[in-house]
Image (tube, rainbow, N blue to C red):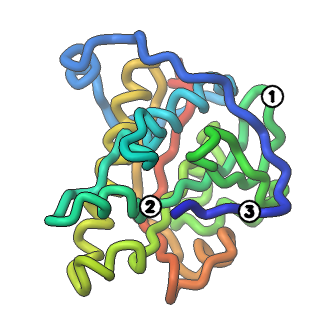
Amino acid sequence: PYKIYLNAKKIKLPAPDFKGKIFEDTVGEVLANGDFSAESISISELSQILAAANGIVDTENKFDLRTTPVPLPQTQSFIYQHPVEIYVLVNRVSGLDAGLYHYSVRDHSLEVVKEYADSMPNCCFTPSVIKDAAVTFILSGIPSRLTWVYDTRSYRYMYMVAGAISQNIFLECSSMGLASIATASFHDDLYNDLLGIDENYEVALLLHLVGKIKP
């Protein structure tokens, strides 16, 4: 299943290019760094991060396979029930207005959710961190996509997938020389209000902040 904002304006992202550093070099350079400069990142860099985080890499039996596959149980069809959604809070991305977007995985585009408001960073315990970052990736989970097979253990697998997405963001930022840091220090009620989600259906998971490294 895919979450869709039916009447939202869509912004098509540039095609990603995965001809970068080899894995061993990238892993060796991964460093959680929240010391961001005031410089913008490009829309191409944003596209690259989103594609690496949770993009579609192939199709199998007419189903989309992503960079972060869901752990596989006995039924093969389960791998297509992906539980994590990515929202993008843009502060400074060249070619994009500041505001809140939803990542549309199927067509690698951004759906405009809300225009930027000064109150948006307040969902984090330290709003200044979000204000300093060029972009904040906001991860949410939809447990019902997993409960039909994993029941009460679905949360465990949802967190596994969220962790894999966050690690992909760290790796891609490392390969591009960007600063990044992840945090779960946020106010759930403000987080839910920002995204416009019902916590009984869709739950807050984590924030991943990205920007240019301060010289």
On the question of residue 91 being in view, the answer is yes
Per the rendering, the mark at residue 5 is 3
Task: Note whether 34 is above or below 24 in the view shown.
Answer: below
Identify the residue at the far front of this view.
61
Residue drawn at (50%, 34%) of the image: 51
Note whether residue 39 is visible.
no
- Residue 24 tag number: none
Between circles 2 and 1, the one closer to the viewer is 2
Tell me if 111 is positioned left or right of 211 in this view: right
Q: Residue furthest left?
A: 74
The reply to whether the C-beta atoms of the residues labelled 3 and 2 are less than 8 Å apart is no
Which is nearer the N-term, disc 1 or disc 3? 3
Would residue 31 be found to the left or right of residue 1 on screen? left
Q: Position of residue 35 (x, y in %)?
A: 48, 34
Up-down relation of residue 214 to residue 207 (above or below): above
| Residue topped by disc 2 | 84
Question: Disc 1 on helix, strand or loop?
Answer: loop
Tag 1 near tag 3, CB within 8 Å:
no
Q: From the top left corner, tell me how far across and down residue 119 is, in percent.
A: 75, 66
User: CB under 8 Å between callouts 2 and 1?
Assistant: no
Q: Residue at x 56, y 32 (%)?
A: 211
Per the rendering, the mark at residue 95 is 1
Q: Is residue 210 left or right of residue 22?
A: right
Secondary element type, mark 2: strand
Pinpoint residue 90: horizontal percent, then vertical percent: 70, 44
Splitting the image into 4 quarters, where does residue 114 fall?
A: bottom right
- For label 1, count other residues whose C-alpha is less than 10 Å away and answer few (under 14), some (14-19) or many (20+): few
Q: Quadrant of residue 133?
A: top right
Q: Mark 2 and mark 1: span between their CA atoms?
A: 26 Å
